[in-house]
Amino acid sequence: MSRIDVRKTYKLYIGGQFPRSESGRSYVVNDAKGRLLANAAQASRKDARDAVVAARAAFGGWSGKTAYNRAQVVYRIAEVLEGRREQFEAELRAAEGVTPARARSYVDASIDRLVWYAGWADKITQVVGNANPVAGPYFNLSTPEPSGVIAVVAPRGPLLGLVSVVAPLIITGNTVVVIASQDNPLTAITLGEVMATSDLPGGVVNVLTGSQTEIAPWLASHMDVNGIDLTGVEDAELATELEVAAADNLKRVRRPAPDTDWLAEPGLDRMTQFLETKTVWHPIGV
Amino acid sequence: MTPTASSTASTTSSHAVFDDIVRSDSSLRRFLHGLPGVDQVGCEARAAGLATRSIKTTSKAYAIDLAIRMVDLTTLEGQDTHGKVRALASKAMRPDPADPTCPATAAVCVYPDMVATAKQTLGDSGVNVAAVATAFPSGRAAMDIKLADTRDAVEAGADEIDMVIDRGAFLSGRYLDVFEEIAQVREACGDAHLKVIFETGELQTYDNVRRASWLAMMAGGHFIKTSTGKVQPAATLPVTLIMLEAVRDFREQTGQMIGVKPAGGIKTTKDAIKYLVMVNEICGEDWLDPDWFRFGASTLLNDLLMQRTKMTTGRYSGPDYFTLD
């Protein structure tokens, strides 16, 4: 007897849950050769709104954890990803049509990227913080704090690009609403499954799949979003529009980076871009 | 608002209609237990069905403004201070200081000792002061203390009194005691509007909610209110549906309109609109007015304001731009 396939329904990842789009829509995702791979949920502005609410609700708890603890959680994501590498390699091969060796190298790089950022959690303060010399009997200490809820337009590509834009934001204590690459949304949702089982509190990362032209403007103008990372916006006109919309509540904006080499060592700027500096004056005792 | 002359007159006449029923405990029990039983499954299905209605664009804008006008902005905490009540009263008069077209709320709801403070801030702005009385929220005190509590609040300037019924007496079947209690408090209210709180979370069955509704309406309450907000579950859609049916049937029988106030647990604009849809479907447009329907709430107002801002500016707003309650 032949067995009926059990096909996976790709949904969104919001607040630790996997809901369908509020709009009920979905869109067709093809593999590298243009054959049907699966249907993905097509998120609407209301899904984006719900995701921001979830991210805001998660912010207090996540940013309040010790840096050491956040490092453990992000490292745990890497561990779980390692355990499911075969699934990810298969998905990458299907989505991009790459060779097995190349798929393996992308998964390796993604796992290594997570571990690399995990290590930074309890070190970034020492690097970008400072004890400032002041003309008076005070300790003057500057320390970085997370900006808050950050919206991210993820770059093209199924896995490495997404990991590379999300990990630096959450490691410093921000919470994230990410619009996955429109052409490769499936791996993003599978990555959501990894995060949901890695002690990452619900709402810290929220993944939307669908059209960036439809969703991104709502996130850019949202008054409860503190920053927006436009890395994956390829249309220059849209990028300008989003920057203008983001100005309303003075969001921190990271401009598009079309030709980023995701395999290269990333540097610190993805972390430092969405940090605020708190400076405290403390009297020196006798 | 305070009752109109006609509704006061009809209250007296409605008493006459029910004279036979409230003559003795047994006749009252016979009447209340003779009310048709509530079909629990049907009631919950109806409430859930009405909650799926989609209210958009201009209807939504209307619903949001109406809901704001219906809010009894409430603070009933042990930690309330005069300063907090003043801040709340200011917010009630001008919920969105950035937008002069935003309507004021219906009332501010506070403990009796805060009535004078609230009144002083509100002045003649048209926003009423509601005070919870009669040993709120438990209702466990001697009758003369409850009456003194009520008079005290009215003397301090309360326009509306929110009383709690003695759930112990109600649940043990001493309906006449509850009836007398409500009638006496109503008398102590003088010109102030009386809202009768059932604490439906403690009444156990929908049948009891229907009985309590009729009891309170016959005893002269101007409003029937679901909950104190101190007990879970507080207001729910099915319970409010039963109370709306009761006030609708009461008007058919007596010609007198009674208000309904769900309180506690209504936190989002979406929830509030579900209630408004239900009011319109069960009771009709006459009840879509702050004089006849209220929301007892504190956090709801901020969500209404955020939605209102979203509709006027076209972008999502955030809690950073509204006062903390």
Image (tube, rainbow, N blue to C red):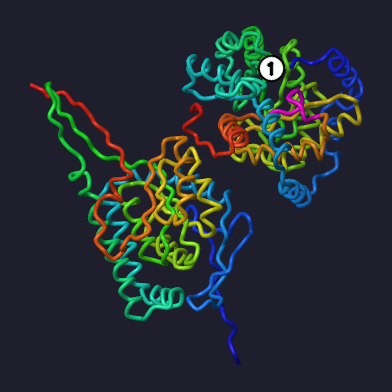
Residue B267 shows in this picture: no
The structure residue drawn at horizontal position 39% and vertical position 66%, both measured from the top left corner, is A159
How would you classify the magenta stretch by its main secondary structure? Answer: loop
Residue B4 shows in this picture: yes
Badge 1 local density, few (<14 within 10 Å), some, or many (20+)? many
Nearest the eye: B100 or B187: B100
Task: Point out the residue furthest to the bottom here.
Answer: A1
Identified by mark 1, the residue type is Glu
Q: Which residues are magenta?
A: B287-294
Instruction: Say if A125 sits above or below A258 in the image.
Output: above
| The stretch drawn in magenta includes residue B293 | yes
Q: Position of residue B145 (x, y in %)?
A: 62, 15
Q: Is residue A67 left or right of residue B294?
A: left
Question: What is the chain identity of the residue bearing mark 1?
Answer: B
Instruction: Say if B290 sits above or below B186 in the image.
Output: below
Quarter of the rendering containing residue B130: top right
The structure residue drawn at horizontal position 30% and vertical position 40%, both measured from the top left corner, is A145
Residue assigned mark 1: B160
Q: Position of residue A221 (x, y in %)?
A: 50, 41
The structure residue drawn at horizontal position 29% and vertical position 49%, both measured from the top left corner, is A271
Nearest the eye: A81 or A253: A253
Mark 1: secondary structure: strand
